[in-house]
Image: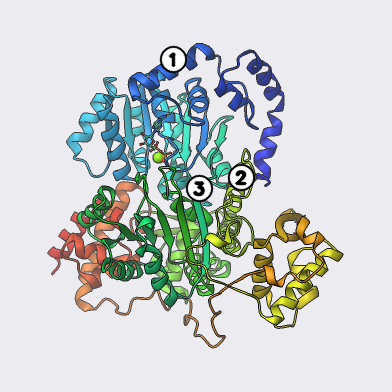
Amino acid sequence: MERGGRLKKADQAREPRLAASAARKRSHAGPAEVELAGQRFGSSPAPVALEAQSGDLAQTLRSRFGFEAFRPHQEGVCQAVVGGRDVLLVMPTGAGKSLCYQLPGIARGNTTLVISPLIALMEDQVAKLRAQGFRAERIHSGRERAESRETCFAYLDGKLDFLFIAPERLAVPRFPEMLAKRPLGLIAVDEAHCISQWGHDFRPEYRMLGERLPLLRPAPVIALTATATPRVQEDICKQLGLEDPILSIHGFRRENIAIEVVELTPKQRVPALIKLLEDGTRRPAIIYAPTRKAAEQQAEELAGRFPAMAYHAGMPGSAREEVQTGFLSGKYDAIVATIAFGMGIDKANVRTVIHTGLPASVEGYYQEIGRAGRDGLPSAAVLMHSWNDRRTHEFFMERDYPPLPEVEKVYRALSDEPRSRNSIESRLNLDPQVFEKALEKLWIHKGAIVDVEENVTKGDSGWRKPYASQREHRVAQLEAISRFTSAPNCRMLELVGHFGDQEDSRKPCGRCDVCAPDDCAVQQRRPPTRTEADALDGIIAALQARDGLATGKLWRELFEGSTVDRKKFEDLLGGLARAGYVGVYDDSFERDGEVITYRRASLTYEGKECRESVAEHVQLTVAAPTPAATKRKPKGRLAAGRASKSPGEGDAVLVEALKTWRLAEAKRRRQPPFTVFPNKTLEALAIGRPASQDELLQVSGIGPKLAERYGTQILAIVAKTK
Ligand code: ADP
Ligand code: MG
């Protein structure tokens, strides 16, 4: 699999240094150096006595961290960081990334600054480090002012080994300057994919890191993430300003997870889920449901049979915590969650991860199934999906990323003089939600300057390209996950290829539904019908005449206009692949500077030698019926998102009160008010009038993060404006 072209270019530029470092490496033969030497990005480590150091590191690992040995790749990364190099580390969840900043942090001395996106993650890491005898502290919105002040003093007195902060803390006036009063030993950016708008969990707060980090240098920076495609990797390096970084991208192949992808209508999924999990050896299980409601319904269905609970962002914090601890301790056998569950979850014996809907991206999917089988024992990942799932995603995509012409309309309405958002909005005939999204996108891409009073000024005209490519990227992510479900190739190979893990063996996994169709837990097979049998033989004959045809061309030449539509054709190819007659591989070409990928089908040895009908050796999957053409589509782009009620008279006061508060908060954060939360959420608050944290979380648009940060303040405002 090709890596991102631009990264490759960067490697070439470094080639002279590569040769020099290779020579140096030959004179030291430590295992970690071999690992670094084998990498495309290896270049000279800083002048540290490596051999002496590697012994020291192993010693520190044992004496300070209590681990017997390094896990794969840890030692090489630790050496590089101790030697002062910037590093991007991409390894799956649970691989042991934290140690790769903790140990070098201790080895380098001074404080290690850790930037982390979630309070829960910070608390967890701090507790663990303290238990190991390190001096670790954290500053975040959940702590008292006095505590934070104490922490700052401890830092300034040189009493901290580790200081954890949320990224937005660096925007607080004078905070980075305070940090800069002492030299940091190391800067670690955890969950670094959040900085990239191409990543699946983009957080605008991360964007300021690029600006603030230079102030905290010359400490080396290590960026860590479990999920980054080559494009995201490149983006992280660029945005964080990593200098000549070592890229360590490893270990995406999971040997013990059998992946199964199965087409089922939404109705068929719950029975399949029950059947699957009634077998106790398939539990504990994590089920990822597409919506909060689905999570609750599915949990209820399961709970009648074994201990199962729902887990989603709409539940109060205490309930979520109870479910999470209950799952960890074995009290619950299954958790039905929305994606809110599992960041940083460390439960070794999860036997099955099930998706009861199509995930939004391959990156997210991979991260979620990665929570299965951390103990190394055989585990399964079952993905249930159907045609309609993709449509739903497309619908949300359209809503969250308005089409370019609509954003353009908003941009045109801006002028060089600041004008109030309301006056601009009222001149445009746009749905308020579309307007808000469009404005937000313009702001992100600098096409609009929005001050804290929500006065908007026309910004840079260069926003179109980045916005268009961000939008295209979302489309491509959907395309990628759809391709993943329909590709007749080894599932694990597809995933490994997606992440650009170049040291992978490229061998089929032998466990997934494509490699081992007879071991499937859910998928049902059937023999081909007469027509299908003829079609199968037709495909073999066509490839025997001309091997390696593009699949699109193959279909057009053989079947276009017949009852074998494109989807059926893919099913047939899948059957042939599973039976070992055909392989399908990616190919690409460039047009107008754009790389276009497609697939070619090619015969295996069996396929080439085959002289009789293959039909009796081929099993086809029992597919979910495709939706009839008459099925209704969501009406209008915003039908599903629109609130059924609008704020009434009495609520207007509350809306105003909330706006005033939001403005103050925006000023404090020095960002436009919609970054605190959008109008849509504000209105939902006015309608819902939450009286407790529980009720607050029921309000659409309010997740645990917002509730945690602002819950008390919002509830107080609601209570006051009765
Ligand atoms: P990641 O951040 O990659 O998801 P963590 O850093 O949280 O993973 O590590 C996962 C688990 O592995 C933790 O419980 C950690 O203590 C453990 N671990 C890490 N390195 C080692 C090691 N060298 N030996 C034994 N256990 C380790
Ligand atoms: Mg981690």
Residue 196 — which label?
A: 3
Among the two numbered marks 3 and 1 on one chain, the one whose residue lies closer to the N terminus: 1
Q: Which residue is mark 2?
A: 500
Q: Which kind of residue does numbered mark 2 sit on?
A: Gly
Residue 289 point in image, percent of width and height? 39, 64
Residue pictured at 39% horizontal, 61% vertical: 288
Quadrant of picture, ligand 2: top left
Mark 2 against mark 3, which lies toward the viewer? 2
Badge 3: how crowded within 10 Å, few (<14), some, or many (20+)? many
Residue 605 point in image, percent of width and height? 78, 55
Residue pictured at 56% horizontal, 31% vertical: 245
Q: Is residue 600 above or below residue 33?
A: below
Residue 47 point in image, percent of width and height? 56, 14
**Can the viewer see residue 155 in this picture?**
yes
Does dot 3 land on a helix, a strand or a loop? loop
Indicate the colouring scheme: rainbow
Q: Which kind of residue does numbered mark 3 sit on?
A: Ser
Q: Which quarter of the figure is the C terminus placed in? A: bottom left
